[in-house]
Amino acid sequence: MSSPLQQINELVSSLPAKDLGLAKKFIEKKDWEALKDLTWSCLQLLESAYEKETIPPKYQNIDLDKVRELALVCDEYYYLIYPEEEEIEDDFDYSDMMEEDI
């Protein structure tokens, strides 16, 4: 099993050309937060294009699953390095709870 960093280096080539250059710079500079943000931004753009079924030619050869995997691996690696940065999302709405329910 390869490490998250090895996976990042293997999967980064699945990004669109415009983002690939930036991603490689972020890897060189070890700017993991910027890389994480870039991959998620790219993923959102791609998913939006696929949902609308208006995929620009520059994205037609992009493997969406590999970009998803890259985004997840970037998150995994970032939170391995900076575990204190991991945000715990709590979607439960406590405002509706009554005291006797507690």
Image (cartoon, rainbow, N blue to C red):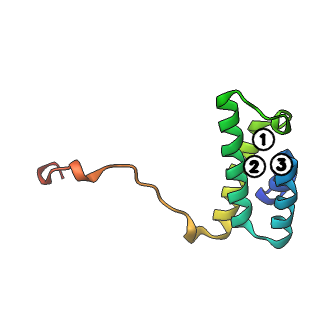
Quarter of image, res 61? top right
Residue, disc 2: 70
The secondary element bearing badge 1 is classed as helix
Q: How many marks?
A: 3
Residue 65: image x %, image y %?
Answer: 74, 37
The secondary element bearing badge 2 is classed as helix
Point 82% across, 53% down: residue: 19
For the residues bearing labels 3 and 1, Cβ distance under 8 angstroms: yes
The secondary element bearing badge 3 is classed as helix
Q: Residues within 10 Å of mark 3 (few under 14, many from 20)?
A: some
* Image position of 92 with respect to 62: above or below: below
Residue 87: image x %, image y %?
Answer: 51, 62
Q: Residues within 10 Å of mark 1 (few under 14, many from 20)?
A: some
Identify the disc placed on residue 81. Answer: none
Q: Nearer the viewer, residue 35 or 72?
A: 35
Whole-number angstrom distance, CA of label 3 to CA of label 1: 7 Å
Residue, disc 3: 11
Q: Nearer the viewer, residue 63 or 85?
A: 63
Label 2 sits on what residue type? Answer: Leu
Q: Considering only order in the chain, which callout, 3 or 2, is on the residue closer to the N terminus?
A: 3
Point 80% across, 50% down: residue: 1
Label 3 sits on what residue type? Answer: Leu
Quarter of image, res 24? bottom right
Point 70% across, 31% down: residue: 50
Residue, disc 1: 66
Outermost residue, top direction?
A: 53
